[in-house]
Amino acid sequence: MDRLPTIEDVARAAQVSRQTVSNVLNTPAIVKPATRKRVETAIRKLDYRPHASARRLRMRKSSTIAIRLDPMTNGISGALLDRFLHALTEQADARGIRILLFTAADPVAEIEQIRKLRAGADVDAFVLTATFHGDPRTEWLVQNNVPFVTFGRPWGANDMNNPAHLWVDVDGFSGMREATINLIDRGSSRIGFIGWPSPSGTGDDRRRGWQEAIQERLDLGEGDLTALNVSIEDRLEDARDAVVALLEGDARIDGLVCASDTLALGAMIAAASIGRNDLPIIGFDNSPVGQAIGLSSVDQSLGEVAAGALELLLGETGGDLIHRDGAAGDIRHCLITPHLVIRQPLRLLAPDAE
Amino acid sequence: MDRLPTIEDVARAAQVSRQTVSNVLNTPAIVKPATRKRVETAIRKLDYRPHASARRLRMRKSSTIAIRLDPMTNGISGALLDRFLHALTEQADARGIRILLFTAADPVAEIEQIRKLRAGADVDAFVLTATFHGDPRTEWLVQNNVPFVTFGRPWGANDMNNPAHLWVDVDGFSGMREATINLIDRGSSRIGFIGWPSPSGTGDDRRRGWQEAIQERLDLGEGDLTALNVSIEDRLEDARDAVVALLEGDARIDGLVCASDTLALGAMIAAASIGRNDLPIIGFDNSPVGQAIGLSSVDQSLGEVAAGALELLLGETGGDLIHRDGAAGDIRHCLITPHLVIRQPLRLLAPDAE
């Protein structure tokens, strides 16, 4: 075998599932002795080293990493991936690596593009963005032994710790928790959350951050949590209408945290339109739009995300560790802690408010 | 010679300047007969065809075009090149071409990067952005016979018509003229222009559009034009302060056109802060920030710009013709007409306005 053996190779050789191999490595006590023995034999036979500290990616002459670039959609939060691309290009350049762009209409088309780029042998590895529940791309990449890293953790429970899936992500939970606590420290005692409909890996994670801060620091019950929790698609107008309804239905609300700057801008316009210009609002993404109008927001620290992605691909150490796959130094997953940026907002007056 | 001969090859062979070759081709009457004969001999000997209608760029296996990506700067107007990159990637993909990104700190470093990428033989052509007076990059590319196209015309007077320099640009003059006339048609009779300090190719071009509309349609003298013309760096705060001073010094001003959305947003905040929420303002770039707050703006039609750039590189026809280098169908320069987007603005109240 020309390449390093993977957990899948072991699973195939031992005729067990990948999960079973992982169990043998991490929690051997729960595996039946006969199965364990078979897996251990396969590991020895293939010389599988789950914690190889060698540089993962042997860059070829091309030294090129490819990433999909989508058509422009939402100009507010959509710019996030552009900012990631800038950071990635800069960090890659510092390592002598180029970034190649391609497009794809959907995950299946993206797999096909990756297959073609691999066949042309001019790309060493792939960076994937916007991971989701049951993402077929990462499964395909693992199966086909293609070097890759995702910006976004795998959202299926079992996949989070898969050593074959390198990922870097931003800790939305802690970011939203910090934003909520900031409002509490500034005097808010009834804080609403404007987020996306469940299930959404990213959205639910951010919602949990708000929820934990509320439960820890405020005297609010389950009924309040339900009443203060708004789920809405990521569109400015929808957020505006939903927040008007929320604030008109509950005059005691004295703060809002939002899962995106798009939602936060809608919330600002809503608050202004009913004379609540004073309502403190915090968004998420620290978008250029938010910066221009003085919106407070959670910044995803995209420079660290880009550095983390490259370090994982190249097998360098670094980044904030959340999962060590056994041996020290072999980091395969990075969870970046975002940081809160507080600004003095411009006051907005909605068009029909005069 | 493996490649097609260029105007430089002819100049070298005839021991004259490039300009002299160009004169022989375009205005032979002004060239001394002896010189003309020497140049014509060189043209025949080299089989130089200035108007070759064959596809200019013979894409090799890599089918890759490279473009420099800068670090993120201004989040408002700076996003323009990101939007261009999206459009370019999409249009290139439709032609089976990939986009490779690299970074460079300055024009000299960019030339060095281009040299390296050419040496590696994995890039077919280059797209350059942000051309400027005396741009050393384009001169180097022409001299070294590297296929390229610029988004941005060459701003030196003699270079505009250089057939060796393919370029696509947006007609800022006509865009700003249309914006100004739109305000006049809606009743404005004293319209200020907020632009960048001269000399600025792009900025001066946009200023001329405002100026021509004013001179054509309004009864204003030279003194008025001077008083209504503000030059300021492209920063929101600077624009805000300058527009406050402008409006406080001249209460009759009843409209503003701005060379960028950054300036226009500063102008909106300035107007709101002194109770002039009603002042019509038009920006330039149709940025996501502008879209979010309902700013009217001139849209650069980046899809057309991207298509034009690729068509020029590939020797396809298309785009708005401003210069035909002799033979019909051989378009080497595209000037795209932008279009005006009128919106109902949100009302802004500056922080200290209450």
Image (tube, coloured by chain):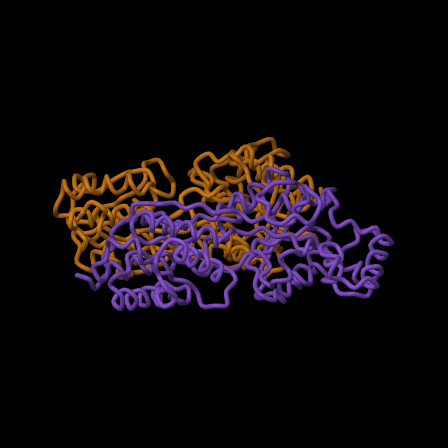
Chain colours: A purple, B orange
Report the residue at 67% width, 63% height from top.
A139
Residue B96, compared with residue B231, is above or below; it is below
Locate residue B219, reporting x and y percent: 15, 49
Which residue reaches farthest left?
B251
A55 sits to left or right of A186: right
To which quarter of the image does residue A235 belong?
A: bottom left
- Given the current orientation, which residue lies at the most extreme top position? B15
Q: Is residue B344 visible?
A: yes
Residue B210 drawn at (x, y percent): 27, 48
The image shows residue B208 at horizontal and vertical percentages of 30, 45
Q: Nearer the viewer, residue A182 or B52?
A: A182
Q: Nearer the viewer, residue B141 or A127?
A: A127
Quadrant the N terminus of chain B occupies: top right
B281 vs B168, nearest the viewer? B281
Instruction: Looking at the picture, tell me which residue is in the foreground, B187 or A33.
Output: A33
Classify residue B237 by image quadrant: top left
Q: Position of residue A242 (x, y in %)?
A: 33, 67
